[in-house]
Amino acid sequence: MTTTITPETSGDAIAALYADVQDFYARHMRLIDEGRVEEWGDTFTVDATISNNANPHPAHGREAIVAVIHRAQAELERRGVQHRHWMGMLTVEPEADGTVRATSYALLMAVSRGGAPLIDRSTRCEDLLVRVDGDWQIRVRRVHHDAMP
């Protein structure tokens, strides 16, 4: 979808936006679950920020975000664990400037080789999405871990 979506946009356009954003997240999470960290990193703006209530130090910039995930992926590999992300209960709120606020619940499942899947984390994810060269990218991600204050 290449048209600008604003809060005043019609219901059909909002439905198309919702489907477009949902498709973005399906591709985004599949990249990380498949270990394609560099491609996953490309779904963030160069100046993106990720923060969460479990870590007082946000990651600033695509390079820093990718570096954090490379370290996490190496640790998972060492432990023989595969992560799978599931995102649902998505809401999209178009802003007047063309950005989109997307909120979802995300479950992170950990599957050990030969073991049963376990829910590792339950979170609420709040993203600010922007269009860059026709594709969605995340400018700001805030993750709220349910088990944390």
Image (tube, rainbow, N blue to C red):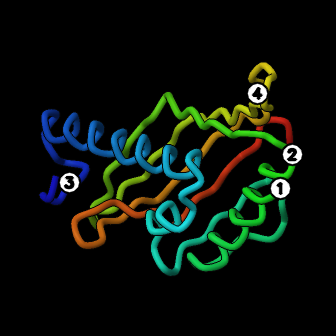
Marks 2 and 1 close (CB-CB < 8 Å): yes
Q: Earlier in the sequence, mark 2 or mark 3?
A: 3
Q: Residue at x 36, y 55 (%)?
A: 100
Q: Amino acid at mark 4?
A: Ile
Q: Earlier in the sequence, mark 3 or mark 4?
A: 3
On the picture, is 38 further left or further right than 65?
left
Q: Secondary structure at mark 2?
A: helix
> Looking at this rendering, what residue extends furthest in the front direction?
114
Q: Earlier in the sequence, mark 1 or mark 4?
A: 1
Foreground tag (1 vs 4): 1
Marks 2 and 3 close (CB-CB < 8 Å): no
Marks 3 and 4 close (CB-CB < 8 Å): no
Q: Secondary structure at mark 3?
A: loop
Q: Which residue is mark 4?
A: 119
On the picture, is 67 further left or further right than 63?
right
Foreground tag (1 vs 3): 1
Q: Amino acid at mark 2?
A: Arg
Q: Amino acid at mark 3?
A: Ile
User: How far apart are the two marked residues, 4 and 2, measured between alpha carbons?
Assistant: 16 Å
User: How far apart are the two marked residues, 2 and 3, measured between alpha carbons?
Assistant: 44 Å
Rate crowding at label 1 as few (under 14), some (14 to 19) or many (20 or more) other CA atoms within 10 Å. few
Rate crowding at label 3 as few (under 14), some (14 to 19) or many (20 or more) other CA atoms within 10 Å. many
Which mark, by number, is residue 75? Answer: 1
User: How far apart are the two marked residues, 3 and 4, measured between alpha carbons?
Assistant: 35 Å
Which mark, by number, is residue 79? Answer: 2
Is 29 or 37 nearer to us in this picture? 37
Q: Residue at x 71, y 46 (%)?
A: 144
Q: Which residue is mark 3?
A: 5
Q: Amino acid at mark 1?
A: Glu
Q: Secondary structure at mark 1?
A: helix
Q: Quadrant of the C terminus?
A: top right
Q: Earlier in the sequence, mark 4 or mark 2?
A: 2
